[in-house]
């Protein structure tokens, strides 16, 4: 099994937005925490929300960890991640060209990376799918 930690730097303002997406309001989070005061995730989210109300421009590292089976991601997938992060291709076709791969092969690999949460796609002109890496660092433990 491969342990992948995805890390991105975000501001307190962005963190609060993500809390709003999850909990709607700080009052809802407080209510949830009252109902389950042993839930450490709720406690940490509530503490962070309260802190970043007054520190909206402060940067924080936001991370998440995913676990993959050894065969889920291969050398080609890792190469695509590197190209997406550093070359910022504006389409799957351009990504395939950068990787010296066929478009269909690249698309399949990119969809797997999306499914695993490593990248996302943004809509571009002419129905293009633009691969986006939303993380600053990826740590892989085997």
Image: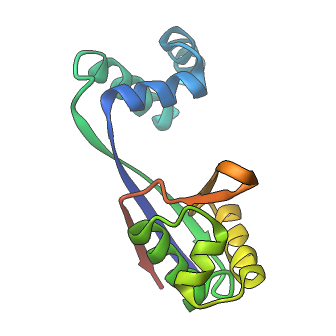
Q: Does residue 113 appear in this view?
A: no
Residue at the far top: name it.
Answer: 27
Count of numbered circles in the view: 0
Is residue 88 depicted above or below 36 in this figure?
below
Work out whether residue 85 or residue 1 is closer to the camera in this orientation and state it: 85
Quick check: can you spot residue 13?
yes
Q: Quadrant of residue 103?
A: bottom right
Q: Residue at x 51, y 8 (%)?
A: 27
Image position, residue 128 (x, y; %): 70, 57
Q: Quadrant of residue 95?
A: bottom right
Using residue 63 as the reference point, say whether residue 57 is left or right of it: left
Q: Position of residue 79 (x, y in %)?
A: 50, 84
Residue 83 appears at what percent x and percent y? 47, 75
Out of 4 and 39, give the one closest to the viewer: 4
- Vertically, is 43 above or below 95? above
Figure check: 57 above or below 30? below
Which image quadrant: the N terminus?
Answer: bottom right
Q: Residue at x 61, y 55 (%)?
A: 120
Q: Is residue 74 left or right of residue 14?
A: right
Q: Which sits in the foreground, 73 or 111?
A: 111
Q: Residue at x 53, y 15 (%)?
A: 34
- Snapshot colouring: rainbow
The x and y percentages for residue 136 are: 36, 59
Hey, which quadrant is residue 50 in on the image? top left
Residue at position x 78%, y 80% in the image: 104
Instruction: Pick whichever, 129 or 53, lies toward us.
Output: 129
């Amino acid at each position: 099994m491969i342990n992948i930690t995805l890390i991105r730097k975000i501001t307190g303002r962005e963190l609060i937005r993500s809390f709003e997406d999850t909990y709607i309001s700080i009052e809802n989070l407080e209510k949830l925490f009252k109902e389950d005061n042993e839930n450490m995730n709720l406690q940490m989210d509530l503490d962070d929300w309260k802190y970043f109300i007054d520190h909206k421009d402060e940067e924080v590292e936001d991370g998440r960890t995913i676990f993959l089976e050894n065969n889920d991601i291969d050398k080609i997938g890792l190469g695509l991640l590197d190209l997406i992060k550093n070359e910022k291709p504006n389409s799957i076709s351009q990504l395939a060209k950068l990787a010296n791969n066929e478009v269909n092969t690249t698309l399949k690999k990119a969809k797997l990376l999306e499914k695993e949460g490593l990248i996302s796609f943004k809509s571009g002109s002419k129905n293009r799918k633009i691969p986006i890496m939303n993380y600053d660092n990826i740590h892989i433990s085997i």
